[in-house]
Image: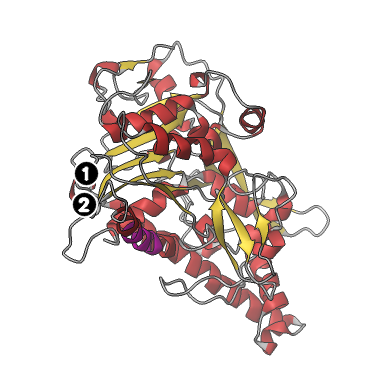
Amino acid sequence: MPNQPPVILVHAINGSVLRDEYPLPPGPVWDPGYFAVEAFERIAVHPESPAPSPETALFEAHGPSRVAGSHAVRLIYGELLDLLRKDLPEKNEPPVPAFVFSYDWRQDNRVSASRLGEFIAEVIERTNLLRHYAGRCDSVDLVGHSMGGFVIAACLCAGKHRSSNGRPRVRRVVTLGTPFLGAVDALAKLATGESEIVGQRRHTEREIARLTPSLYQLLPVYDRAFFDTPTRKPLSLLDPANWQESVLDSIAESIRQHTTDRSLAQQGPAADSQRQAAARKLLERRLEAWRDLHKLIDDLDPDDLLLERNGWLPIVGIDEKTRFAAGLSLRTDPGSGRSRKEWDFLIAEADYDGSTNPAAAREHRLRLGDGVVPLRASVPTWIDRKRVVCVAERDFGGLFHLEDALVRKFTTLHVILPLMNLVQRWVLSFLKGRRWGEVWGRPLPDVRSADWLPPIPGVGVKAD
């Protein structure tokens, strides 16, 4: 049997095409590979969808429709997938089976994690039907980009990757830019719509985002991510009182438009009050799911959950302008005189010059990130900081296809990590267990070069 297990690629929050399966034939309603296919209103979640469980799915607000994940966006993942299949096997060996776990990224991540566990079992069964594996495959390797790494972590912590006798069926894991501790950009999307974490930078998408369970689960959990602007005291987003009123207003309006409860669809102050109460309950449910998911993965132990020690490789992007915190203020509307809550987003700028104060420079670089995820949110406590591999925009090299160049120009480093040649070489090197091609990297800013422990022998520190 070949030494290399099959590989499953788990995409990011908006990394798969969504299609409506009710039309004949089914048609895409979300496809980032085509600028015209972003029907946000078609993927809006019904405010009265059932509570998430592995057996239930989200229902759409506009029907009749049945939206489901179709396939990963080839523009972002196609090249990496081809490399895994063709270059991961050793010379004269058949291609390695490389699969994509295409999931509905709107769903609660615990639902996706459960289905990933089922997919792992399916992939092993399929691989064992190949002649060169001949029934001897018992594990997979996983590669997760952005929220895909979050789905992987939730799957492992819930034990969904284990066989009937409790044995892990995952050997190694690579995560690319995963916001293990969240991303302030998720709050920016919910508050203003002006974030690229899902869709485009436009405020018209915020109403739809405010109903999407997975987006809430990307809210930050690290210290002082949220604070009260006047007092600088930290705030908890688990309390709906610390949210912009406009978020509850949007949810309440969606309830008014789509509710099956006649009393909630009425006009007047009494119905308004009822809708606000229903909106608050829905927001509380989304925030409780966020809390519960992070509780699930906070104590993850890779050495206990994987077949190999040191089997987890986190690759993170650094030194890009990134939102790292948000302060809540009261704003008075000059016209109505009403005061409303509003978030102010703190952004770390990439051109900071800390050469005269090394400690301040290190702290600033930890606030930077990959354009979406601040560096401090990329590394949970259960990952050895000495083993984290950092890459930067300046690591891009080689020739690009026109479409690759356009993606690189108009999106963040976070989005295009799977397209980076260096990242691809790191993934293959780690899964092979030896260096493949020219590989270099950087430690975290607070890790000395002499203490860095890259997981591939013979890899040197990149000198900028």
Query: What segment carries the magenta color?
Result: 113-122
Task: Return the x and y of residue 43 as percentages of the image width and height.
Answer: 64, 63
Q: Determine which residue is flagged by label 1.
A: 1
- The relative height of residue 266 versus residue 405 in the rendered view (above or below) is below
Q: Is residue 319 visible?
A: yes
* Residue 402, horizontal then vertical, whole percent: 67, 27
Tag 2–tag 1 contact (CB < 8 Å)? yes
* 126 or 181: nearer the viewer: 126
Q: Is residue 442 left or right of residue 57?
A: left
The residue at the point 57 percent across, 34 percent down is 347
- From the image, give the main secondary structure of the stretch colored magenta: helix
Residue at screen point 54% across, 53% down: 71
- Dot placed on the residue nearer the N-terminal end, 2 or 1: 1
Quadrant housing residue 322: top right
**Going 49% across and 55% down the picture, which residue do you hit?**
102
Q: State the residue position of label 2.
A: 136
Vertically, is 65 above or below 442? below
Mark 2 surroundings: few (<14), some (14-19) or many (≥20) residues within 10 A: some
Q: In this orientation, which residue lies closer to the viewer: 261 or 333?
A: 261
Report if residue 208 lies within the magenta region: no
Callout 2 secondary element: loop
Q: Quadrant of residue 241?
A: bottom right
